[in-house]
Image (cartoon, helix red, strand yellow):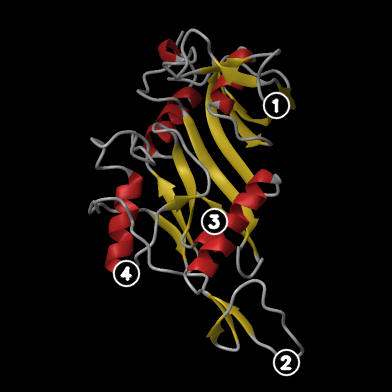
Amino acid sequence: MIQKLTRSKGIRLNRKPAFLARKVKSGDVVGARVTTEEEVGLEPWATELAILHEDRDILLLNKPPFLLVHPLSPEHRETLAHGIAHHYLQQGLRTKVRPVHRLDRDTSGVLLIAKTAVAHQRLDRQLRERTMKREYLALVGGLVTEESGVIDAPIGRDPRRPHLRRVRAGGGDAARTRYRVVERYDSATLVRLELETGRTHQIRVHMMRSGHPLLGDRQYGGRALSPMSRQALHASRLAFLHPDTEEPLSFEAPLPADMAELRDKLRQPRVP
């Protein structure tokens, strides 16, 4: 970022362009242009966004299920990123769409977007240093007997299905997921999960390994356990420090309709 600022004359000393080699003295005023107009690189798509919070640095959304965050190919023109590009256009902003973390296509819930490169850098640091707290709610198969615990199992690519992941003791990346039981039903459990690491499909892989795959998860063993057409996973809460003010922030998103409906059905006692 500093190199880009230097090339674009975005670093100023006493209101004049300056290079990094310039030495400063008492009384000098150093400034940097931290926001610049950028090519968005996406065709705007007019769609309604469920905005939880927005200011000049960040955008918090409640992502619906069945929607990609990023386009995976040029044919994908109706993703959440395209919708955010349209939202920025309506505000007169010309900046890239910068999600700080990722949610799978079928996972719903809180998603954090940085509106500037500086905000993204500071939030990404919190993510890497594990000071950003991410909590999920999931409906899983079977009865989880322990009230809480930690699943500590490395995750890597599945050699036979490279687009999927699996626990790999010898060649995976470290992965830790904390869980706590919220409610138990006859044949399923509602659990709250907290990510200590952010591996691809981490919750889904860890819960399958524990013997409690997510209901509806067609890729990790839960498809036959639920009438849902997606995995029953929802990003319920995100807590972090504001990238500019460093104020502690916390945002929550309620269960989407499909998961709430399934939970209510599971609460009903079975008829003999």
Pick whichever of labels 4 and 1 is earlier in the sequence. Answer: 4
Q: Which mark is residue 120?
A: 3
- Give the percent coordinates (x, y) of residue 76: 26, 37
Task: Please tell me which of labels 2 and 4 falls first in the chain.
Answer: 2
The quadrant of the image that shows the N terminus is bottom right
In the picture of the structure, the residue carrying the numbered disc 1 is 174
Please say if 92 is above or below 219. Answer: below
Does the residue at mark 2 contact the one at mark 3 (Cβ under 8 Å)? no
**Which residue is disc 4 drawn over?**
91
Instruction: Categorize mark 2 by other alpha carbons within 10 Å: few (<14), some (14-19), many (20+).
Output: few
Type of amino acid under label 1: Ala
Identify which residue, 88 or 224, lies in the foreground: 88
C-alpha span from label 3 to label 1: 24 Å
Point out which mark residue 27 bears: 2
Which of the two labelled residues, at mark 4 and mark 3, occupies the earlier sequence position? 4
Q: Give the residue at x 49% y 40%.
A: 102
Residue 191 at x, y percent in the picture: 60, 29
